[in-house]
Amino acid sequence: MRLRRLHARICLSACSYGLGGICICVGYSVRQMETDNLSKPPLPFRKRIERAAGRAGLRLVVGPVRSMPLGMARKTGRGIGYALYLLLRRYRRVAHKNLELVYGREWSEQDRRRMAKAVFVHFGQVATEFLKLPALSKDEVDALSTVEGEERLQQALQKGRGAFIVTGHFGNWEFLARWLTLHGYSLNVIARKANDPEADRILQGTRTEGGAQVYNRGNSARAVLQCLKKGELVGILPDQNAADVFVPFFGLSTGTTNGPAVLHLRTGAPLVCTWCTRKPDGSFHILFEEPLEAVPGPDREQDVLAVMTEINRRLEAQIRRQPSQWLWLHDRWRASPHVFQNKMDSAQ
C-alpha cells in the first residue's frame, strides 16, 4: 500500500500540470494577489519525502515527453491520465462526487464513472501537451486550431484599457495562451508558486518559453494594473473553489472568487470569455465571446454578483457541451458545504 501511494505521488507530481497546476491565472481575490507571500512553517518529514519522489517523477517524465513527437506525447498523456484515475483514490472520489451532484438525475452511475475516467485521460493529455507547447511554431499551432470571434478581442483592446481573458480549467487553456502569444498579443499570467521548487521551475519556465509574462500571485495586483494600462491582456481562470461570493453554477449556489468582477469594475477593462475546446480530430476550436462590460451602479456588491453570475453562466454552458474537458476532480464545492447537505435533505 505504501509503495502504491508513493507511485501515485510520483505520477501526480510529475503530471500536476494537467490536474490543476497549469493555471493561466487562477481567479484569486485582489487581497490574495497582494498577500500570498507570507512565510510558511517547515514541512514535515513525510511531505519532504513526497516532494523528493515528485522531483524524481518529474525528471522521468518531462525530458522524454519533450523529446517525443506531439502525437506520441498525447498518447503518453492519455495513458498517464488513465493510470492516475486508478491510483488517485482521493481525486477519483471528488470527480465522482461532483458528477453525481450535477448529473445524478440525468446519468447512470456507470455513465458518471465513464465520464470521470475520460476527465482524467483528458487532463493527462493536457499535461503532456503543455510540455510540448514552447516547441510548436506558429504554423503548427495554426494547423491545430480554428478561431472564432477574434474581432471581438480586437475591438475590446481598441478601447485602450487592456482586457481580461476569462477562461477556465477547461479544454486546453495553455494552448490558448500559446496561440495568443504567437499571434502578437501581450499575455500576462498570474500563477501560484508550485509547492516544490523543481515543479515551479518547470511550470513557470514552460510558460515563459511559450511567450507569456508570468507573475507570482503574492505581488501581482499592481502588475495587473500596469499591464492593463499598457493595453495588454491578463488571463484569469475563476472556476476554482472560493468563498468571496455565492452565485449560481449548475443551478447551485456556489462559492466563487470575486476577483474578475472587482478588477473589471475598478479598471473598466473588458472581460472577454474565451474557450479552447478539443475537437474529436485532436485540433482545437478557440472561441472569443462578446466582451462583458458592466456599467457600475450604486450598489457595488450587486454589481460584483451580477458579473460573476454571468461568468459562471457562460462557463457552465461550455462545460455542458463538453463535460469531459472540465476539471471535475477539483473540489469545486468545498466552500459550499450546504450544496451537498441540501442534496441529502432533498433525498430524504
Image (cartoon, helix red, strand yellow):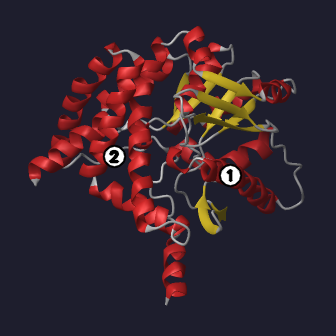
Which quadrant of the figure has residue 173?
Answer: top right
What residue is shown with label 1? Answer: 317
Write the residue at 79% across / 37% down. Answer: 270
Q: Amino acid at mark 1?
A: Ala
Look at the image and tell me whether residue 45 can be seen.
no
Which element type, helix, strand or loop, lies under badge 2?
Answer: loop
Label 1 Cα neighbours within 10 Å, binned few <14 / some 14-19 / many ≥20: few
Q: Position of residue 289 (x, y in %)?
A: 77, 38
Which element type, helix, strand or loop, lies under badge 1?
Answer: helix
Write the residue at 47% across / 15% down. Answer: 134
Look at the image and tell me whether residue 104 can be seen.
yes
**Which mark is on residue 92?**
none
Placement of 259 over or under 24, stated as above or below: below
Q: Position of residue 244 (x, y in %)?
A: 61, 59
Write the residue at 55% across / 16% down. Answer: 211
Q: Position of residue 261 (x, y in %)?
A: 73, 49
Question: Quick check: 199 left or right of 5?
Answer: right
Task: Pick out the residue farthest to the bottom.
Answer: 348
Label 2 Cα neighbours within 10 Å, binned few <14 / some 14-19 / many ≥20: few
**Which mark is on residue 40?**
2
- What number of labels is visible? 2
**Of residues 18 and 25, the one drawn nearer to the viewer in this rendering:** 18
**Of residues 131 and 54, the one drawn nearer to the viewer in this rendering:** 131
Q: Earlier in the sequence, mark 1 or mark 2?
A: 2
